[in-house]
């Protein structure tokens, strides 16, 4: 998956806001002020941090060698996904959807997207 396609998918989520709060290469996508995706835009292959249910996070790490404990994140709740082409796009998009949904659930009702 290319960076352009990834950004398009992430930013299509309701209420998604793109920022570079840490440096000029770490793209952070938030909803309701909370992060649901981080992308190392200068990495080859790209690396994407996504929130995940803890039990599912472990299962994904066991199934896909390209899914690792979240780099610089709470490793119980976050995975780093190496976009090396080994994960089918449908599965990657499902991981993004889950991350978004988990974060939206934690956003106060007044800040949730419509």
Image (spheres, rainbow, N blue to C red):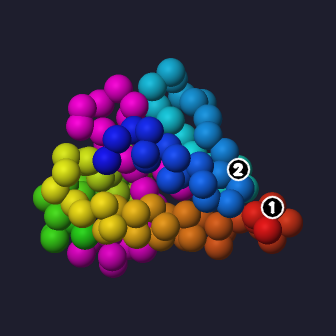
Q: Position of residue 62 (x, y in %)?
A: 16, 70
Alpha carbon distance from label 1 to label 2 = 8 Å
Q: Nearer the viewer, residue 80 or 83?
A: 83
Which SS class for mark 2? loop
Q: Is residue 56 magenta?
A: yes
Q: For the C terminus, which image quadrant?
A: bottom right
Which SS class for mark 1? helix
Left or right of 62, for residue 108? right
Q: Is residue 57 magenta?
A: yes
Q: Position of residue 23 (x, y in %)?
A: 51, 23
For the residue carrying disc 2, how many other residues have a C-alpha within 10 Å: few (<14), some (14-19), or many (20+)? Answer: some
Asked whether residue 77 is in view, the answer is no
Left or right of 15, for residue 6? left
Q: Nearer the viewer, residue 9 or 50?
A: 9
Q: Nearer the viewer, residue 60 or 45?
A: 45
Task: Look at mark 1 in the image and give the residue it sits on.
Answer: 111
Q: Are marks 1 and 2 in contact (CB under 8 Å)?
A: yes
Q: Is residue 77 above or below residue 15?
A: below
For the residue carrying disc 1, how many other residues have a C-alpha within 10 Å: few (<14), some (14-19), or many (20+)? Answer: few
Q: Is residue 37 above or below residue 20?
A: below
Q: Position of residue 90 (x, y in %)?
A: 33, 67
Q: Earlier in the sequence, mark 1 or mark 2?
A: 2
Task: Look at mark 2 in the image and give the residue it sits on.
Answer: 33
Asked whether residue 23 is in view, the answer is yes
Query: Which stretch appears magenta?
Result: 36-59
Q: Is residue 111 above or below residue 94?
A: above
At x 71%, y 56%, the residue is: 15
At x 25%, y 48%, the residue is: 82
Farthest top residue in view = 24
């Amino acid at each position: 998956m290319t960076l352009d396609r990834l950004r398009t998918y992430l930013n299509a989520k309701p209420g998604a806001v793109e920022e570079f709060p840490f440096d000029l290469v770490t793209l952070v996508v938030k909803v309701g002020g909370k992060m649901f995706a981080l992308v190392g835009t200068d990495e080859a292959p790209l690396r994407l941090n996504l929130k995940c249910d803890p039990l599912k996070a472990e299962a994904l790490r066991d199934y896909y060698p390209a899914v690792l404990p979240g780099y610089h994140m709470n490793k119980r709740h976050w995975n780093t996904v190496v976009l090396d082409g080994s994960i089918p796009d449908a599965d990657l998009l499902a991981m993004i959807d889950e991350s978004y949904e988990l974060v939206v659930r934690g956003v106060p009702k007044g800040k949730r997207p419509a």
